[in-house]
Each structure stands twice: as C-alpha cells, then as structure tokens.
Image (cartoon, rainbow, N blue to C red):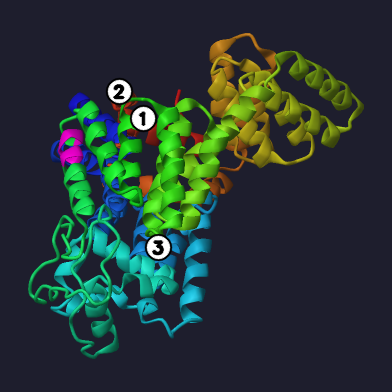
Amino acid sequence: MDKVTELKEQGNAALQAGKFEEAVRHYSAAIALDAGNHVLYSNRSAAYAKAGRYLQALEDAEKTIELKPDWGKGYSRKGSVLAYLGRLDESVAAYEEGLRHEPSNQQLADGLKEARARLADNQADFGNPFRSPDLFARLAMDPRTRAYLDDPDYVKLVKELQDNPNSFGMKLNDPRVLTTLSVLLGMNLGKGAADEDMDTSPPPPSPTTARPPPPPPSQAAPKAKVEQMDQDLTSEQRQALREKELGNEAYKKKNFEAALKHYNKAVELNGNEITFLNNIAAVYFEQKEYQKCIEHCEKAVEVGRENRADFKLIAKAFTRMGNAFKKMGNLTSAKAAFEKSLSEHRTPEVKSLLSDVEKMIKDEERRAYINPELAEEEKEKGNELFKRGDYATAVKHYTEAIKRNPDDPKYYSNRAACYTKLAAFDLGLRDCDKCLELDPKFIKGWIRKGKILQGMQEHGKAISAYQKAIELDPNNSEAIEGYRSCTMAASSNPEEVRKRAMADPEVQAIMRDPAMRLILEQMQNDPKALVDHLKNPEIAAKIQKLHESGLIAIH
C-alpha cells in the first residue's frame, strides 16, 4: 500500500505540473497494484481528460462509479467527459444520477447547470452539423473518420467547432475538417485541402499555392503534427524554421541556453511568428525567469494579434503568462491572464487553472481576515445576546468569530447551542461535528451533540455522544444525566425503537448481511465473542451503528 500511495502522489504531482501522460503512467502503475481503488481510476480519468484522451477518461470514470457507486466524484468525472465528447444528454443524466447520491455536491450541481445550458444551445442550433447530438457516434462509425478519434488534437478540433461554429472558416486548411463535414452531411465535399500545420508553423501560403492531397481515409491521423515546408517560403522563413527546430531539440534536452540562442535567431529572421516568442517564454519559465517569461508572452500576444495568429496560440501565451504570475505569487494577475486565455480558447485545463487560482485567492483573503482578538470580542457579544435570549443575533456574532478564528472549537460549540435553542438541529449538529473535528477531547462539544441528537429523537446516537463525554470526564453530571435519560427513552418503547432503526438504509444493509447476522447470533449466545469481533474495524463500525440505532445493547 505504501508503494500505491507513492505512485498516486507522483501522479498527482505530475498532473498539477501539466505532465498528463506522466500522470497516467503513475496512476496506471498504482492501479496494477491496487485494482479495486476507485480514487486511482478517478485520478487517471482526470489525467486522460486533460490529455484530450476522452474515451479513455470515460472508461475510467465508469470504472470509478462501478467500484464506488455512491461517490459523487465519479459521476462528476463521467459528466464532464461526456460533455467534452458532445454527448450532452448522457452528461446531464450522469450529473443527475450523481446528485441523487450526493444532493449537496456543488460540483455536480454546477456541472449539471453547464451541461443543460449547452444542451439547450445545441437544440436551438441544429443548423450547425457539428452540434449533432450523436456527432461522435457518427464519426466513430464512418471509416473516413474513425481513426481520427484516436488523436486527442482531432477531438479538441471537433469540440472547438461545436462550441464556436464561427471558427469553421479558419479551419478549412485542415483536410480532416472537410472529411468530417462530408461524414456529417452525408456527402463528398472533395479533396484538396492542405495538410495540417503544426501550431509552430509559419503563416499559411497564398491560395494559389499547390497543396498536396489529404491522407487516404483508411490512414490513421498522425499522433504528432508534422510541419509542412511550403514551396513559397522565403529563405529567411525557412532558415527561421530550421532555427526553431534546433531550439526544440535543445529544449527537449534541457539545454536552455542553446534553445534561447536558436529561438532568438528565429525571431531575428522572422519577427512575425508568435510561436517563436511563445517558445522563448517557455524557456524562461523553465529557468524560473518568470518576469522575462511574462514579457515575452505579452510580446507574443501583440505579434499574434498583429498577424492574425490562431487564437489557440494567443490563448497559450496568456496561459503561460498566468502560470508565471502564479509562480511569482501574483494571484490577481494570474487570474486575469487565465481569464483572457479562456476568452480566446476555452479548454478544461485552463478552466482548472483558473479555478485553482480563485480558490487560492479566497484562501488568502480568508487568512488575511483572521484576527483572534476580534474573534474573542465577537464571542463575548454573542454570549451576552445568548443570555438575553436573542439567539438569532447571537448566531451572527459567533459566525463572525468563526471567520476571524476558524480553528477555535469553542465558537462552533457556542453557535451550536444557539442553533439548538432555535430548533435548527441539523445546523447545530454540523457545528458540533466541526468542533469535535478540531478538538476530539472537547467535552462540551460531545454533550451538546448528545443534547441535539436527543432532541432529534436519535437516542442511540445520543447515548454514544454522552459515552464519549463520560470517557473524558467520568464525573461529569451533565453527561451522566443525559446518558441515563436517553437510555430510559430508548428502552421505554422497544417496538418504536426497532421501527425507527429499520427505516435507516444503513441499518437495513447491515441486517441483510448474512455474515453480520451470524455475528449477532454468536454475540447473543456468547457475550465474550463481542471482544473478538470488535477487533475488526469494519465489523466494529457496523456493531456501533446497530448500538446507536438502539437495536442492540453493549455492556
């Protein structure tokens, strides 16, 4: 298990660093050692999705759900991948199923909202063949496009045409676009488009330049883009491309000084190509020269706009700029850069980066707001209002105290007392749980929890809470009295206790388990058997659940 954890952490680190294929390798190695671990499949699904390998991502999401059908994250993964594949009906269904298991999961709710909005847009625009509800199914069935689906870049291209039909005219130089359109329209639009260019290619040739035919339909799309050396390039442009390729080779070998030398030479020969500047910025990022990286990204955006570069290249410059700002700790500028990148080209990777930065900004704001002295002042105001019986206003002051010092358990305990007076038992119980999470030995927290559960007629659970308090302080009269009261209530009407317990799905599942029925029978015949069974954490948890429900007594 230590090796599995190590591999998972390596995969997480690679994923955070944007090394998606490396992350896949680590997660796959971990899965080979622990094939029943749903978290590993979920993480690998994320890595596949970020790498544009959506079909594999979908398989892992479905495996996650198979292993852990009540875990909302699996449905979130599945819904997200289905949305990227254009299967929006299924995406909506996945999110809805997840919310049936975890109704309060905000990530699922947000995903459902976005999937429904996209579905509505698609239904309102059947004039765009790329918005066909069964688009990917049709492409997979036709031999002309089936092999293309193995290429993540092709899947991204189709998604782009789904989301932004106005970009169609800009993509006509890609032969796969016309082939795809032929399949969707059920007709042959002919051949003659140029081979796909790398995003590192020079400006396209004039319309009069002869272009090679596209690859035969049976030939799979290439895994890596191949740059085309068009016949009408100037000698300077050709030399610039050679310098760029030399720079790429040096970059791969982490010989950054040599890479810079070649990329700068490429810029000297052809100053109108955004890719050369993007590559220079990438080198400076690797060298941790973040300010220089940002300056070259800004220059890349300027050159790209002047020369009408592909908006994906401009988006890439903004993304790298955002990453550089993030490394420098300038989160506000990083957020702005990621937002600009998304305005050029929306990708799940950049959306994730933006979300991470926004969370970091909120965390910084929360930490900056912390002030223990002001927290104590707010607590005292709350205490005074509590004594006067103004519980609603007291809650506001305790809430402010929590914001000012969120790690102090007594503020949660005090607010729980207010919620109890207001009969908001669910909120009070949540505060008790938070209080005890921060300090498991906080006796007042266990007593408050016992009182709330007692008010909710959950006498078995209340008994357990009071028992915890008594373990911490055997002479605590409040805990002892609560324990006695709940014990008497639980034993006064055994039939009512049984009915209430059997209405709990978790209790029902335990009682249906043949192994647990055998264990309970052993305990009845031989009370000493309980000691042995409690050594197994899983069985102990189930016995504790039955005890809390009032179905069994433990002495």
**Majority secondary structure of the magenta segment?**
helix
Q: Name the kind of residue labelled 3 in the image.
A: Ala
| Marking on residue 133 | none
Which residue is pictured at 40% across the width and 40% down the height?
320
State whether residue 507 is above or below residue 234.
above
| Marking on residue 540 | 1
> Pointers 2 and 1 in contact (CB under 8 A)?
yes
Q: Earlier in the sequence, mark 2 or mark 3?
A: 3
Q: Is residue 318 left or right of residue 20?
A: right
Q: Name the kind of residue labelled 1 in the image.
A: Ala
Of labels 2 and 3, the one closer to you: 3
- Which residue lies under the disc numbered 3? 94
Q: CA distance from mark 2 to mark 3?
A: 39 Å
State whether residue 530 is above or below residue 248.
above
Q: Is residue 87 visible?
A: no
The verdict on residue 513 being magenta is no
| Marking on residue 535 | 2
User: Is disc 3 placed on a helix, strand or loop?
Assistant: helix
Position in image of residue 490 (x %, y %)? 59, 36
Q: Earlier in the sequence, mark 2 or mark 1?
A: 2
